[in-house]
Image (tube, rainbow, N blue to C red):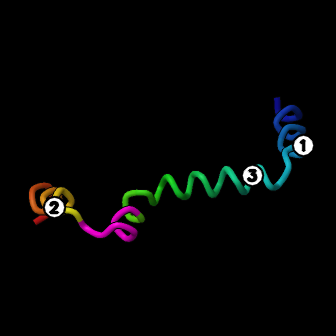
Amino acid sequence: MRKLAYSLTSRTPPAVVYTMFLVLLVLAIAPASRVILFGLSLDDLLQLRCFGVG
C-alpha cells in the first residue's frame, strides 16, 4: 500500500498539486473574499447582527 501511494505521488505532476491547492484555498476563503469583492449586503449585515457573538 505504501509503495502504491509513493508511486502515485511521484507520478503526479507538480502543476496538478498546485492547482488543487489553489482551488481548495479559494474555496476556504470564499466567504471572506465575497465580502471583500462585493462589499457587505443587507443580508450580510443582518446575519452579523442576528448570529454574531455579542
* Residue type, numbered disc 3: Val
Q: Which quarter of the rendering shows the N terminus?
A: top right
Who is closer to the viewer here, 12 or 7? Answer: 12
Report, in whole angstroms, how far the alpha carbon at label 2 lies from the one at label 1.
Answer: 49 Å
Q: In this view, does 23 lie to the left or right of 39?
A: right
Q: How crowded is mark 3: few (under 14 residues within 10 Å), some or many (20 or more)?
A: few
Q: Which mark is residue 42?
A: 2
> Badge 3 is on which residue?
17
Of tags 2 and 1, the one toward the viewer is: 2
Q: Where is residue 35 in the image (x, y as percent from the top left)?
A: 33, 66
Who is closer to the viewer here, 32 or 40? Answer: 40
Q: Are marks 2 and 1 in contact (CB under 8 Å)?
A: no
> Badge 1 is on which residue?
11
- Residue 3 on the magenta span: no
Residue range highlighted in magenta? 34-40
Tell me: residue 21, above or below residue 2.
below
